[in-house]
């Protein structure tokens, strides 16, 4: 298990995150006193499993999206 003080962790966060991604645990210390563990979230790399087009046909729009949300007579109050 690797150990890092807060300042070192803050200055090299990307490096330590890479180490954790490889499965290593990092003990975080404040003035050399252990306060937390930085551990991998899960085993392996899950990746993105979303399939392109999986939501096709699931949304139905029942209004005209080009119509303004407020009436035209109220537009002048927005310019004041």
Image (cartoon, grey):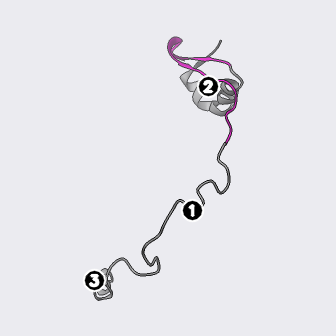
- In the rendered image, residue 20 lying in the magenta stretch gets the answer no
- The image quadrant of residue 6 is top right
Q: Which mark is residue 42?
A: 2
Taking 3 as reference, is 69 left or right?
A: left
- The image quadrant of residue 39 is top right
Q: CA distance from mark 3 to mark 1?
A: 39 Å
Q: Which mark is residue 77?
A: 3
Q: Which mark is residue 49?
A: none
Name the residue rendered at 58%, 56% in the picture. 55
Q: CA distance from mark 2 to mark 3?
A: 54 Å
Q: Image quadrant for the C terminus?
A: bottom left
Q: 23 or 58: nearer the eye?
A: 58
- The image quadrant of residue 70 is bottom left
Which of the two labelled residues, at mark 3 and mark 1, occupies the earlier sequence position? 1
Question: Vertical placement of 39 versus 50: above or below?
Answer: above
x, y percent for residue 22: 72, 24
Residue position for label 1? 57
Q: Nearer the viewer, mark 2 or mark 3?
A: 2
Please provide the residue range marked out in magenta: 24-48
């Amino acid at each position: 298990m690797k150990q890092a003080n807060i300042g070192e962790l803050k200055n090299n966060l990307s490096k330590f995150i890479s180490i954790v991604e490889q499965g290593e645990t990092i003990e975080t210390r404040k003035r050399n006193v252990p306060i937390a563990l930085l551990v991998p979230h899960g085993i392996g790399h899950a990746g993105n499993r979303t399939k392109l087009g999986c939501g096709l046909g699931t949304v139905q729009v029942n209004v005209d999206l080009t119509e303004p949300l407020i009436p035209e007579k109220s537009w002048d109050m927005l310019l004041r």
